Image (cartoon, helix red, strand yellow):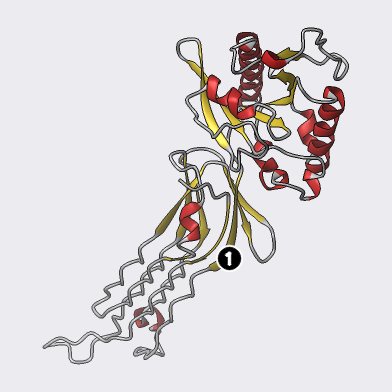
């Protein structure tokens, strides 16, 4: 399936039906009063988060969504039916903005979360409502109101616990492939990963967490170089970052510092997230290799995805950090 993480669509709620102008006509009531029914309400447009969806691909092929209009009122005080609502499914993690103003309308985070994004027009009242002592035969009724119409910009930010950050060919795809059932393309050249990959990492018997691998970033990514800026938003929701540098880097400390600078320039809040430093490809490291100090008090893990070296301690620490944050979030939610 093609990965699409941004889209623009238009939505139109249904117009309300018009009220009816009608008078009661029966055999023994030749001059009955007004009995025009009301028009039906126009259909609403809703957005609903669905965890079964993982891309905005559908919106590349369908750009317009229109709810049903309300039926017109009828005689004998019969109201028209309401228009059919439209429910649009979006992946969890979708941010929805008004395309004209840029205002964030909603952030669809939880599965099943639903929001009305365009309200249907109210049906017009029939002439039965306008009879008075001095106007006993009103020959007019209300028209239905127009339904709301809006252009939407949607942006998907993946929902993951761990985000992998590194230059191209840093070993991110290899790590996610050995930690999970994800099967990203792996090769010994830069930019093998062109779209984000998600993998579910099993921990012990009944525990798991989600890991996201994004395309490698390069210096200047925050200003638009390479593929980085296009996908950096997918790590904004993660609980923990793995900042990965291969052991064969010419200057591991400098590369690590560059990655942190790019994260800070894109979104300074990313540096406030818990992070682990990971030196990869230890199976090809020279015998005299010494683990450099990357930042004060930083936890540095040395691993080899190919050889399976150092993976368990890394997975244990990831689970510890994720569990601690889950408990903290649960406590905040209960207060």
* Residue 293 point in image, percent of width and height: 86, 15
| Farthest left residue in view | 27
The residue sitting at 85% across, 15% down in the picture is 292
Measured along the vertical axis of the image, is residue 315 above or below residue 100? above
Secondary structure category for the residue under label 1: strand
At x 61%, y 33%, the residue is 213
Is residue 90 or residue 173 the one in the foreground? 173
Compare residues 257 and 241 and report the one nearer the observer: 257
Instruction: Note whether 10 is above or below 167 in the view shown.
Output: below
Q: Give the tally of numbered discs.
A: 1
Q: Which residue is mark 1?
A: 151
- Identify which residue, 277 or 124, lies in the foreground: 277
- The N terminus, quarter of image: top left
Q: Quadrant of residue 260?
A: top right
Rendered location of residue 229, percent (x, y): 72, 46
Taking the image as shown, residue 127 lies to the left or right of residue 320, namely: left
Disc 1 residue crowd, few under 14, some 14–19, many 20+, Cα 10 Å: some
Could you say which is closer to the camera, residue 303 or residue 297? Answer: 303
Left or right placement of residue 64 versus residue 152 in this view: left
What residue is rendered at 26% in x and 73% in y? 78
- Percent x, y of residue 138: 37, 89
Image-quadrant location for residue 100 = bottom right
Percent coordinates x, y for residue 111 in the rendering: 48, 38
Residue at x-position 59% and y-position 39%: 196
Which corner quadrant holds the C terminus? top right
For residue 326, above or below residue 68: above
């Amino acid at each position: 399936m093609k990965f699409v993480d941004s889209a623009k669509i238009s939505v139109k709620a249904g117009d309300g039906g018009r009220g009816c102008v009608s008078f009661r006509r029966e055999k023994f009531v030749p001059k009955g009063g007004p009995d025009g029914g009301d028009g039906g309400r126009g259909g609403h447009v809703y957005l609903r988060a669905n965890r079964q969806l993982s891309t905005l691909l559908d919106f590349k092929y369908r750009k317009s969504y229109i709810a049903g209009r309300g039926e017109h009122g009828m005689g004998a005080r019969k109201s028209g039916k309401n228009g059919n609502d439209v429910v649009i499914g979006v992946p969890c993690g979708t941010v929805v903005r008004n395309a004209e103003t840029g205002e964030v309308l909603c952030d669809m985070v939880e599965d099943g979360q639903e929001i009305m994004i365009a309200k249907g027009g109210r049906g017009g009242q029939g002439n039965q409502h306008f009879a008075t002592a001095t106007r006993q035969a009103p020959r007019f009724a209300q028209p239905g109101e127009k339904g709301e119409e809006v252009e939407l910009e949607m942006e998907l930010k993946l929902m993951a616990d761990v985000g992998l950050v590194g230059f191209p060919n840093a070993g991110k795809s290899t790590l996610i492939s050995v930690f999970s059932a994800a099967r990203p393309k792996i090769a010994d050249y830069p930019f093998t990963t062109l779209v984000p990959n998600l993998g579910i990492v099993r921990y012990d018997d009944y525990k798991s967490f989600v890991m996201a691998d994004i395309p490698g970033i390069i210096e200047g990514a925050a200003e638009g170089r390479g593929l980085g800026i296009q996908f950096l938003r997918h790590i904004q929701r993660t609980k923990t970052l793995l900042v990965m540098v291969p052991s064969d880097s010419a200057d591991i400390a400098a590369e690590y510092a560059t990655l942190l600078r790019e994260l800070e320039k894109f979104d300074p809040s990313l540096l406030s997230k818990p992070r682990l430093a990971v030196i990869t490809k230890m199976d090809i490291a020279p015998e005299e290799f010494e683990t450099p100090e990357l930042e004060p008090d930083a936890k540095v893990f040395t691993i080899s995805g190919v050889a399976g070296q150092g993976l368990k301690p890394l997975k244990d620490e990831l689970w510890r950090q994720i569990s601690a944050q889950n408990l903290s979030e649960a406590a905040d939610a209960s207060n």
